[in-house]
Every structure is written in C-alpha cells, then in structure tokens.
Image (tube, helix red, strand yellow):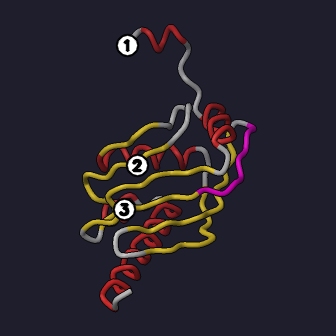
Amino acid sequence: MMHTDQVKADTNLALVKEFFKYYEAEDIAGLRVVLAPEIEWKVPGHHPLAGVKKGISEVLSYIIELKKSNFHADVKIVASNDNFVIDCHRGWGSHNDRSIDMSWVLLYEIKDNRIIRIQTYPEDQYAMDDFFWCAYKLKPIPDRLNPN
C-alpha cells in the first residue's frame, strides 16, 4: 500500500472509532459529524428494526431505537483501507426479560471523510430476530390497522 493509501486507511479507521464513541455516548450531534447526510444502513432480518435506513434522520432514529433496548457494542477488531472499514464487535443488550450477546460484523463505506454506507452482519440472525421482536412489540392489530 502506498503511503497516501495508508494515511487514508488510518483516517477511515479513526472515523469509525469516532462513530463508536458517539454511539456509546448517545451523542447525536457527534453522529451527525461522522455520518453522511445520504447514509444508508442495511439491517438484515425479519424484525421491527430490519430494513434499509436511508438518510441521516432514519439512521439516527434507528440508533435511538437500538439504544432503547440497552444495546451496547465493544469493538474487538477494526481494519481499514482507502474506502472501507470493517469491524467485529461484541454486541449485547437486554430488554423485556430477553437478552442478546454475540459477535457482529459491520462494513462501512467511507466517502469524503464520512460514513456513507453500513451493512450489518450478525453472528446469529435468528437470535437477532428473536431479541428485537421481544424488545419492540408491534401495536395490537386494531391499532395498526386504524391510522387514527
């Protein structure tokens, strides 16, 4: 890797470390600094938080909801290059008598010194689905069907 590529990789690595710092502190202003306005975050699964979050407002709403389940992340390893960062972290939380504690891998795409795309890869998709279904109950059917 050329010297300039290593500098870019180091800069990207520092950016993702800042993201984790702001995430754990629930620092919305800090998150706005590291996340691109047009960010997309892909969350796999069949649970209330699954799907593609598009734009800073949706991503911040997702993070706020995620934090309501007392979900935390402790980074195990991070690697970077000139366009991407990948991390493996321990993610754990507990809510409504249900808990989760497993490894997660996130792939970050960096553009113009901001995170533009995140893809989540859980160790156990079924455990992720089960936890988030227990942590985020849907309204009863009459309330879901009646928008008023």
Which label number is shown at residue 62?
none
The residue where tag 2 is placed is 41
Q: Distance between the residues labelled 3 and 1?
A: 37 Å
The first of marks 3 and 2 along the sequence is 2
Q: Where is residue 126 in the image (x, y as percent from the top left)?
A: 67, 37
Disc 1 residue type (three-letter): Pro
Label 1 sits on residue: 147
Give the residue type that dot 3 points to. Answer: Glu
Q: Regarding mark 2 in the picture, which secondary structure is present there?
A: strand
At 49% across and 66% down in the image, what residue appears? 86
**Position of 123 compared to 30: left or right?**
right
Q: Main secondary structure of the magenta part?
A: strand
Which residue has dot 3 on it? 109
Closest to the observer, 27 or 141: 141
Question: Residue 80 vs residue 56: left or right?
Answer: right
Residue at 70% across, 36% down: 96
Query: Which residue lies at the image location 34% right of the left edge and 89% below the top edge?
Result: 2
Q: Which structural element holds mark 1?
A: loop
Which mark is first along the chain, 1 or 3? Answer: 3
User: Residue at the bottom extreme?
Assistant: 3
Q: How far apart are marks 3 and 2 (CA)?
A: 10 Å
* Direction from residue 24 to residue 101 in the image, left or right: right
Does 119 appear above or below 2?
Answer: above
The residue closer to the viewer here, 100 or 70, is: 100
Which badge, 1 or 2, comes first in the chain's sequence? 2
Range of magenta residues = 97-104
Q: Residues within 10 Å of mark 2 (few under 14, many from 20)?
A: many
